[in-house]
Image (cartoon, rainbow, N blue to C red):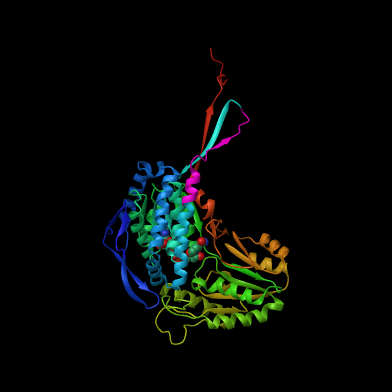
Amino acid sequence: MQDQLFINGDWVAPALGGMLPVIDPATEEVFHHIPAATEADADAAVKAAREAFDHGPWPRMSGKERAVFLRAIAQGIRDRLPELARLEVRDNGKPLPEAEWDLGDAAGCFDFYAGLAEELDGEAEDIALADGRFTAKAVREPLGVAVAIVPWNYPLLMASWKVAPALAAGCTMILKPAETTSLTALELGAIVKAAGLPPGVLNILSGKGSVVGQRLVEHPQVDKVAFTGSGPVGSRIMADGARDIKRVSLELGGKSPFVVFADSDLEKAVEWIMFGIFWNQGQVCSATSRVLVERSLYAPLLARLVEEAGKIRIGNGLEKGTLLGPLVNRGQYEDVLRHIARAVEQGATVACGGRRPAGMNTGYYLEPTVLTDVPLDSDAWVEEIFGPVVCLRPFDTEEEAVALANDSRFGLAAAVMSADDARCERVAKAFRAGIVWINCSQPTFTEAPWGGYKQSGVGRELGRWGLDNYLETKQITRLVSDDPWGWYIRS
Ligand code: NAD
């Protein structure tokens, strides 16, 4: 396990020598310490990234050349996948198969952007000008020095959604993982070093968001900030970035609805709801946390959901068969418990869960929780809980379901289930959300755009949209006529 920062291709101790404890959420034990980068470390990393961008080979290489490094990084992740997955379980708490799944996706993300890097070569687009005295083309170039600030719910995967397209585009980058889950991000330093990435192209700083994150966002030599995390921090980053007109992309929270019509297959509905809210302990920005069920299916669906939720095996993510691990840390655990208590105070009924599982006195464990009778103006219906807590509510008409689904300041994701394809298409179109699932919930693909409407974010990640985040467009226009321009009459 790494215990130094990765700056300019070298491992270095943090400037003030500070370290942060790493706590296993399943045992509450401190099992490692990571470096706490300071503002001076942020400045050193920006200097290295700036130098690598302004004078180094990386932005000047062809896309094909960069793709070789990206594929080597993908392979480096795959070669160490079992070990990295165990690290993420100890850091984050998630069940091992989910961590393996995430890391496979992270490797796949580097491979995918290697392909897009190759496509950048020679993509210059001729522009047809009405004025025949000129020819013009548009070319895309790397944007500059980018900062990636990522959350703790998918540690290396969220990092790869930013690092892979930034490197593919030819940018240089400083990665700031969440302070609770920095282990695999730091290991990425070893992987890129082994892949031979030129110094300064990727720098990795663990440490507090309020210290090193803040400095990176405010640094005048940073061109772009890509952030995934909470709304309040995203809002602050947008405001701080505005001072230097930085490019800012934000992936923020959600309160995603899942509309289930009565003609749906009950068992399939239950399976997708379970996955949509209990996967990764519900700590998923797109989690289907508001389930709207057509009234005639409501009671049977609630009964089956409660029955299945009660069977979920809760335990240490490293134990075989665990489906629900602990929440990521004490702060998050207490926050979710507070949300449940407040929901009850505001009128909700706990249909199941809501408590620490009996006999599990250590670790941040919580039973999968289903809330009903949740008032529309209560916090549980309106605010992101970011835990294994789902609110269920009946509806009577399609119009009512769509109106309830869209009545949120968030707009990240939404899902609809029905046997009627035309209805699914209609509802999908009516949702005000950046990601819409029909007859399922949560599957995420590297090739497809990801991001939110409304307060769920700005911009899109993944697919070719993710690459656009790290490119500038340049117009190159050439005069091809010998005629005088004619602004004044030459004497
Ligand atoms: P957070 O906003 O507290 O922290 C996210 C990151 O920002 C961390 O690395 C943190 O250190 C850093 N940070 C904190 N303060 C900062 C500051 N002042 N300046 C710069 N950086 C700062 O969020 P979190 O608790 O780590 O993550 C949970 C949130 O992330 C949830 O709201 C969730 O919905 C959201 N999320 C969104 C997506 C998405 O794709 N839309 C994906 C995952 C998580």
| Left or right of 350 on screen, residue 323 | left
Camera-side residue: 240 or 136?
136
| Left or right of 93 on screen, residue 412 | right
The image quadrant that residue 485 belongs to is: top right
Query: From the image, which quarter does the N terminus lie in?
Result: bottom left
Q: Is residue 489 magenta?
A: no
Q: Is residue 120 above or below residue 102?
A: above
Camera-side residue: 160 or 75?
75
Q: Residue furthest bottom?
A: 359
Q: Residue at (36%, 57%) from the top-left corner?
A: 191
Q: Is residue 482 above or below residue 397?
A: above
Q: Residue at (43%, 84%) from the top-left corner?
A: 360
Q: Residue at (72%, 67%) from the top-left corner?
A: 420
Q: Quadrant of ligand 1?
A: bottom left
Q: Is residue 120 magenta?
A: yes
Percent from the top left, x then y, of residue 361?
A: 41, 84
Residue 124 seen = yes
Q: Residue furthest top?
A: 491
Percent from the top left, x then y, of residue 349?
A: 59, 82
Q: Which residues are magenta?
A: 114-131
Percent from the top left, x then y, of residue 178?
A: 40, 63
Residue 226 seen = no
| Left or right of 476 on screen, residue 43 | left
The image quadrant that residue 23 belongs to is: bottom left
Percent from the top left, x then y, of residue 417?
A: 66, 69
Please state the total of marks drawn on the protein image.
0
